[in-house]
Amino acid sequence: MGSPIPMLAILLVCFAALAHGRPGYGPGEQDWGFVDVRTGAHMFYWLYYTTANVTNYTDRPLAIWLQGGPGASSTGYGNFEELGPVDLYGDYRSWTWVKDMNVLFIDNPVGSGFSYVDNTAYFTATNKEIASDLVELMKGFYANHPEFETVPLHIFCESYGGKMAPEFALELYYAAQRGEIVSNLTSVALGDPWTSPIDSVLAWAPFLKETGIVDHDGYEAIMEAANFTAELVEQERWIQATAQWGNTQWEVMKASKGVDFYNVLKETRGDIYQRQALLTPEERLYRTMVKYDIDEDRDALLADLMRGPVAETLGISSNVIWGSQSGSTFDIHRTDFMKPVIHIVNELLENTPLKVAVFSGGLDLICATPGTVNWIEKLDWSRKSEYLNASRTAISVDRILEGYQKTGGNFTMFWINRSGHMAPADNPAAMRHVLRTLTTFG
């Protein structure tokens, strides 16, 4: 009779392959933890195992969600405001992505959300550094969850994530090619992306004028500020360009009397721009890109949730305060903020087999769809003509027109109807179509 030890080892391996995570905050099995991506730099992830009716959760893909900012929290905002299983008030969300696939929220870059650095010397300052940290995070994640190494991986993002995700995908692909990591990376999708910041800024005035939100005088004031921003970008005066972007944003606020930058149809208080006048330019920048919502009460609700019930449930040390370093994270990236990464998207399309996609809500202002279309036209890869010559088709869900899509080569653009910047929350039906198209789940 053989030794029982090998059989025990086999049973342990099988159990590990079938085991789910642990109870967390909200329904379903979860897991979470910190990865030391560098000395003094600690990145936090929160994994939701799919609740789909499958034999094993590895039968469904793994989707990463990266928030914007830089400094906004995926585990906070993306999770509770957009696509996680419960919303800010603890109610179950019927359209959660977790019903269809495994979802990995990452607080990135370090200093965002629960991710933190021991001191300011360990912050990232460039997109390349952010990408390197994310690759290290994935090495740690796969070490903890080796069953996901062969599961198709799809990177989704929003806003400033449209700068971080392409370079992360590229560096992860190259690391896998070098044998440094095992990962079944399959696609990267950029949601309402800040991929080419100046193209977004230059689209503000025409978009607002055509929608009747500003008049000719407002258009001229915004356009003058935007053109000056473009001059500074052309001269590669990056810090000044970031400051002038803030000035352009303030011209929008004055001319529109406080339009919501993330959904131009959203109700706002008529005196909101007057309240914003009391803020410093730096505070206005931070609130726009990191806080995500002019509604200070809603911001406070999220902070209280993350620092209270969530931190307690997940056993986060009281020394780690969610969002406490997000302002510094934003500030230190000012020199990188207005730099485009069109060349990175080109490299993804030309040098990798990955599917690359962009999805954009038609009611978004901060990364307005016309600006996104403009930078997509600047892409230059060998199969570009296939995209240019392709027909745009309708996205129809249950006979409702939810948007449009166009595919050529390994690139797809999705136009999302009735949606602002936060497309997963604004139009979940269209986003489920995007998810199915890119991941072929189920």
Image (cartoon, rainbow, N blue to C red):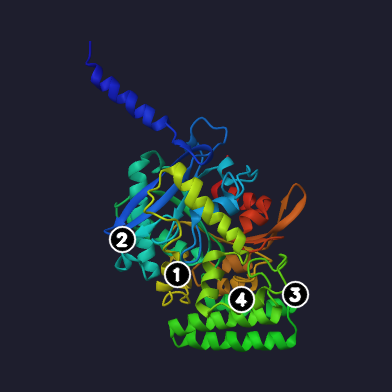
Residue for badge 1:
330
Three-letter code for the amino acid on which mark 2 is drawn: Asp
Upstream in sequence: badge 3 or badge 2: 2
In percent of width and height, residue 324 lies at 43, 61
Upstream in sequence: badge 4 or badge 1: 4
Is residue 324 visible from the viewing direction of this image? yes
State if disc 4 and disc 3 touch (CB < 8 Å). no
Q: Residues within 10 Å of mark 4 (few under 14, many from 20)?
A: some
Cα distance, mark 2 to mark 1? Answer: 17 Å
Residue for badge 4:
276
In percent of width and height, residue 175 lies at 33, 56
Residue 118 is marked as 2
Q: Nearer the viewer, residue 261 or 157?
A: 261
State if disc 1 and disc 2 touch (CB < 8 Å). no
* Apparent side of residue 263 relative to residue 126 in the rendered image (left or right): right
As helix, strand or loop, the secondary structure at mark 2 comes to loop
- What count of labels does the image hold? 4
Upstream in sequence: badge 2 or badge 1: 2
